[in-house]
Image (cartoon, helix red, strand yellow):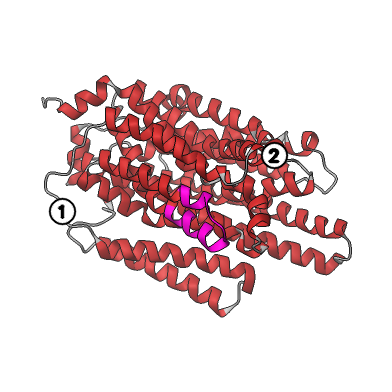
């Protein structure tokens, strides 16, 4: 029987304090994907940029984050998760300071992209540290329940916090607040974590990194071009085709190199593969929800930024409840397939209910009933995915496996923002062409029609994800902490 290393023993003794540090960092990373949403109308007015540019404030972050996560995970595996974690926190704080001080649209987008770069270093280090710290199955369930709540509810918390900061201070504090989160997490990491770099330092797969990052970028860029130029435009089609080819080249390359960025053994597990697809599908649908529902309650219903943030509280509470209940109580009984597939059905039902909104609808009658349903579904999906995707993974692959979860979320989110923005814009244009845009009421009705189509599209995506998850993940498959045998099998 192998003995416990000093790092493992240290992690075991301080595991709950380490979880608190990781949770703070994860909350910062996830809420930053949406905290700007609530301040976006105010920032857009202050910096005077156009409606067709605003999605890049969201997409720049998600795209840089998602396209570099695999590389960030590999860096953590090679040089040690502690220093990858700390470097990510410090860099994220610096980028946030630049964003808060931005005086034009270009600087704001550049700062968001830089946040994504350092988030890509931070997030996989956080998740892989969690996976290696909690190995007892019962404690692992509670730990991943809390972590899943941060991932699933962090976006909604960002809307609430962003509303308060925008209303009582300035939209710039939606960036500056990250310095507080990063400072607390950095001190905790320096005190509690120990570094354990890879003993052999294999070469980094630079070609694979370039192909993965450029492929993701071209896919999202192509979807963004569709909003302005249309689906049949040459630029749109070429961008999408190049993106698909680059991703295909990345997969081919990973089967040929000695030290691949993404060892394909990680994704060949049906449970893990299903979890990654579920995360991507859920993110595609949910990022659009946050964006369009934020604009609906502020622009159409006239909510202040703070009131708009509080509008999401019912969903936040249900995410928290569902995440913890799912991992602690339901996962051993129902299995990953039932929880992920069922969670997606709940989210689809909630979004379908939300699509009933009109210009003269009220929050209580048309928005509120849908939010708890969506929140319960989100909690079941995200908490289960994080646990499933990091189970039975060899220690040397933990960073990449963790990174792939976040990659699925962030690339899915950037694709979802671009795709649903395009769908909503075309629906609004078509509505105004048929009904006229002579009055402010007609323009508002056109915008709401676009939101409704986006909500229904998101529901359809969740429904498809539910079917795929049900077919891919084996019945009653329950993730457990990996063993040495599992690790050896994964490496072989």
Q: Residues within 10 Å of mark 1 (few under 14, many from 20)?
A: few
Q: Secondary structure at mark 2?
A: helix
Q: Position of residue 263 (x, y in %)?
A: 26, 53
Q: Position of residue 262 (x, y in %)?
A: 29, 54
Q: Would you say 286 lies left or right of 248 here?
A: right
Q: Is residue 110 magenta?
A: yes
Q: Quadrant of the N terminus?
A: top left
Q: Position of residue 169 (x, y in %)?
A: 63, 39
Magenta stretch secondary structure, dominant: helix
* Vertical side of 133 occupied by 69: above or below: below
Rendering quarter of residue 487: top left
Of badges 2 and 1, nearer the viewer stands 2
Q: Which residue is mark 2?
A: 308
Q: Secondary structure at mark 1?
A: loop
Q: Would you say 431 lies left or right of 227 here?
A: right
Q: Which residue is mark 1?
A: 202
User: In the rendered picture of this protein, how many numbered marks are placed on residues?
Assistant: 2
What span is colored magenta in the figure? 96-114
At 69% across and 44% down in the image, what residue appears?
A: 352
Residue positioned most to the right: 439
Q: Is residue 310 magenta?
A: no
Q: Nearer the viewer, residue 189 or 270?
A: 189
Q: CA distance from mark 2 to mark 1?
A: 49 Å
Q: Position of residue 152 (x, y in %)?
A: 51, 37
Q: Would you say 480 lies left or right of 4 here?
A: right
Rendering quarter of residue 332: top left
Residue 297: tell me if it is visible: yes
At 60% across and 69% down in the image, what residue appears?
A: 226
At 48% across and 33% down in the image, what residue appears?
A: 150
Sequence-first tag of 2 and 1 = 1
């Amino acid at each position: 029987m192998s003995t416990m290393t000093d790092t493992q023993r240290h992690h075991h003794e301080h595991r709950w304090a380490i979880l608190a540090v990781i949770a703070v960092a994860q909350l910062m990373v996830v809420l930053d994907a949406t905290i700007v949403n609530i301040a976006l109308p105010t920032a857009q007015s202050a910096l005077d940029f156009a409606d067709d540019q605003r999605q890049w404030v969201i997409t720049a972050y998600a795209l840089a984050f998602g396209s570099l996560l695999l590389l960030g995970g590999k860096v953590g595996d090679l040089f040690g998760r502690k220093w990858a974690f700390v470097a990510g926190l410090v860099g994220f704080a610096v980028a946030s300071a630049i964003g808060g001080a931005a005086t034009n649209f270009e600087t704001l987008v550049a700062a968001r992209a830089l946040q994504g770069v350092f988030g890509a270093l931070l997030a996989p280090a956080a998740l892989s540290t969690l996976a290696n710290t909690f190995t007892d199955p019962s404690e692992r369930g509670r730990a991943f329940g809390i972590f899943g709540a941060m991932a699933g509810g962090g976006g909604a918390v960002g809307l609430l916090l962003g509303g308060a900061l925008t209303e009582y201070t300035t939209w710039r504090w939606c960036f500056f607040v990250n310095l507080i989160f990063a400072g607390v997490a950095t001190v905790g990491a320096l005190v509690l974590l120990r570094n354990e770099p890879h003993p052999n330092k294999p070469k980094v797969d630079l070609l694979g990194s370039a192909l993965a990052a450029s492929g993701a970028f071209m896919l999202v860029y192509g979807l963004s071009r569709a909003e302005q130029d249309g689906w049949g435009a040459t630029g749109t089609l070429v961008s999408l085709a190049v993106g698909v080819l680059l991703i295909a080249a990345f997969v081919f390359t990973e089967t040929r190199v000695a030290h691949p960025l993404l060892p394909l053994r990680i994704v060949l597990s049906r449970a893990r593969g299903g979890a990654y697809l579920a995360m991507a599908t859920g993110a595609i649908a949910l990022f659009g929800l946050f964006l369009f529902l934020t604009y609906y309650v502020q622009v159409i219903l006239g909510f202040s930024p703070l009131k708009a943030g509080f509008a999401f509280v019912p969903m936040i509470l249900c995410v928290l409840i569902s995440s913890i209940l799912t991992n602690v109580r339901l996962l051993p009984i129902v299995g990953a397939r039932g929880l992920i597939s069922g969670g997606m059905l709940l989210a689809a039902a909630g979004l379908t209910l939300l699509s009933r909104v009109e210009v003269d609808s009220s929050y209580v009658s048309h928005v509120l009933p849908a939010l708890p349903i969506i929140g319960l579904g989100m909690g079941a999906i995200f908490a289960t995915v994080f646990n499933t995707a990091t189970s039975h993974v060899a220690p040397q692959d933990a960073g990449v496996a963790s990174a792939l979860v976040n990659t699925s979320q962030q690339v899915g989110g950037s694709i979802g923002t671009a795709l649903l923005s395009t769908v909503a814009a075309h629906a609004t244009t078509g509505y105004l062409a048929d009904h006229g845009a002579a009055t402010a009421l007609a323009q508002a009705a056109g915008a709401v029609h676009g939101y409704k189509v986006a909500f229904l599209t998101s529901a359809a995506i969740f429904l498809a994800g539910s079917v795929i998850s049900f077919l891919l993940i084996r019945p009653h498959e329950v993730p457990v902490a990996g063993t040495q045998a599992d690790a050896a099998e994964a490496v072989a």
